[in-house]
Image (cartoon, rainbow, N blue to C red):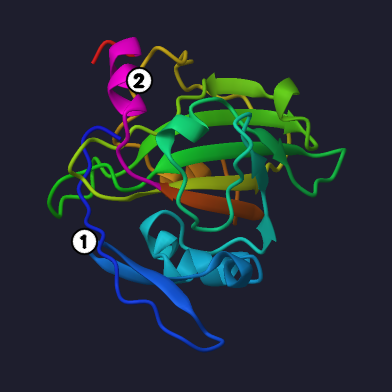
Amino acid sequence: MFPGGCQSRPVPQQSGPEVLDQLKCHQSFCTLLPVSSKRNKMSVASTFESSKIVPDVIPVAPSKTIELKYPSGVVAQHGNELAPTKVKDQPAVSYEADPNAFYTLVFTDPDNYNGTEPVYREWHHWLVGNIPGNNVASGEVLSSYIGSGPPEGTGIHRYVYILYKQPGKLNFDEKKLTNKSIDGRDAFSTKKFAEKYNLGAPVAGNFYRAQFDDYVPLLYKSLGV
């Protein structure tokens, strides 16, 4: 989110059954995005791998989908593009879950850096632990939700949701962050966070892409940036 660096460029539309609508490029990766009817049929693992979320964010792709529907009516569909204006509010989250287990939900932007230095790469937007089953509202909010805010001129960013099944109820020592606090959100590593708490491999995921729109300056103002 602060700052970012990426590029996007369209390619001519093709004809035939395997229609491709756009080539999205971000520094080290380029991904052919299929039209919506095709995208819905793609597996979580294939989209995470083709979009370089594996290995940029996590080493192994999840096998199940996190369903995400925003109050604006839009839904995340494994790489579709959504405007920041449409995802400014916390979404409804659903997924298959063991009602007797606890889960951790991570929402992160791995495209938050300039150049090749990866240390500032992730900027986490939402972090909830100790979620009982699929009741996210009853989880322990470590970092409150902040919507997408890709800076102007940085192209398209990946916004990634990852779900982990915890080994049990955990004692998190992260500083609690409100939706007005940006301190400690950058230089985040989903992989290191998962290792710290022995979360193992992710069980579900989803993502969308977004680029600057007129809402972003309003978001920055609300955060005091």
- Who's the residue at 68% across and 41% down the image? 166
> In the rendered view of the protein, which quadrant contains the C terminus?
top left
Per the image, is 221 magenta?
yes
Q: Which residues are magenta?
A: 210-222
Quarter of the picture holding the N terminus: top left
Label 2 packing within 10 angstroms: few (<14), some (14-19), many (20+): some
Q: In which quadrant of the rendered view does residue 91 lie?
A: top right
Task: Out of 25 and 177, give the one closest to the viewer.
Answer: 25
Looking at the image, residue 29 sits to the left or right of residue 194; the answer is left
Q: Circle 2 sits on which residue?
A: 219
Q: Is residue 211 magenta?
A: yes
Q: Earlier in the sequence, mark 2 or mark 1?
A: 1
Can you see residue 169?
no
Look at 53% across and 22% down and name the residue there: 142
Estimate the spatial distance between the alpha carbons at disc 2 and disc 1, rounded to whole Å.
Answer: 25 Å
The numbered mark at residue 27 is 1
Q: Is residue 1 left or right of residue 124?
A: left
Q: How many marks?
A: 2
Q: Look at label 2 and name its amino acid.
A: Leu
